[in-house]
Amino acid sequence: MRDRKQPEPPQEASSPAWMATLGDLMTNLLTFFVLLFAFSSMEQSKADEIVSGLKGMSITAIPPLDPNAPDEIEEVQEGKFVITKTNYEDEFESEQQSSEDVVQMTMMFDELYYKIKDHIEDKNLENLLNVEYIDSFTIQLRILDSAFFDSGRATIDNQAKIALDEVCEIIVQYGDLIETIRIEGNADTVPIGKAGYRDNWELSMDRADSVRRYILSVSDIDPSLLVASYYGEYNPIASNDTEEGRAKNRRVDFVIESKLKG
């Protein structure tokens, strides 16, 4: 008699795939509500420490890793951390303030330039003075030689003194922005031929210093800002072959440098 074939054991019915997903979702929800319950029962001081840590605070667990940490650390209660404030926020605020200061100083230096320019135009002083930017941080105020000085002399003309007084009143308002005011004397190549001066170089020196001394006597400009220098015939802006060119070369320049330069 042949052996009967044994019946196969019944297979267990498998769960549908969506139940696994549902199980994971329920587990996550349970974890979420447990965390909510834990936070609701947490002491306010601990909650504040956590919030502070998320706002630029750092937790110092191993003091030797922090080069700015003190040699001794105060003893704290068990379960507490030593909270130290980082310098990132302070550095960012400092850099932001520095940038704002640069923008403000640049705008005020522009204001100085346009005030001098408008004053020259309003008072019709173009025959005496000329102002222009050399670069973003340097203003040049040019005094025409023939309008300020008699030929071969370093005494400032009375009409020129009035113009100089008014310009100094503008400049003194912006003294905090200024690093240096160079008063530069220049001349042409024609021999001086006047008693008292050996050459044009010496005359240009005396004229620059004459302007410096006059400014100090009539204005409140900080004396430490003023520097008198002279170039004689060696810093021309035009050809010395014509009378027009020589007239341009006989000049005194105010070179006003901002503190932002260099």
Image: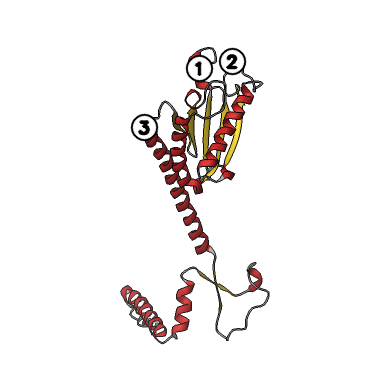
Where disc 1 sits, the SS reads helix
Q: For the residue marked with disc 3, what is the amino acid?
A: Glu
In the image shown, does 244 or 167 lie closer to the viewer? 167
Residue positioned 47% across, 52% down in the render = 101
Residue 40 tag number: none
Q: Can see residue 169?
A: yes
Question: Most extreme residue toward the top, as rendered?
Answer: 241
Q: CA distance from mark 1 to mark 3?
A: 24 Å
Q: Is 129 placed above or below 199 here? A: below
Quarter in which the N terminus is drawn: bottom left
Residue drawn at the location 57% of the way across and 21% of the way down: 152
Query: Label 3 belongs to which residue?
Result: 121
**Dot 3: within a 10 Å radius of its alpha carbon, few (fewer than 14), some, or many (20 or more) residues?**
few
x and y percent of residue 46 in the render? Answer: 47, 82
Q: What amino acid is found at the position of numbered circle 2 in the picture? A: Val
Picture layout, residue 85 above or below residue 260: below
Q: Is 33 in front, or is 41?
A: 41
User: Reading the chain from its start, which is encountered first: label 2 or label 3?
Assistant: 3
**Quadrant of the snapshot with the C terminus:** top right
N-terminal of the pair, mark 1 or mark 2, is: 2
Q: Earlier in the sequence, mark 1 or mark 3?
A: 3
Q: Which residue is mark 1?
A: 245
Q: Secondary structure at mark 3?
A: helix
Q: Which residue is mark 2?
A: 190
Residue 82 location, x and y as percent?
57, 77
Q: Are marks 1 and 3 in contact (CB under 8 Å)?
A: no
The percent coordinates of residue 77 (x first, y second) are 57, 86
Q: Amino acid at mark 1?
A: Gly
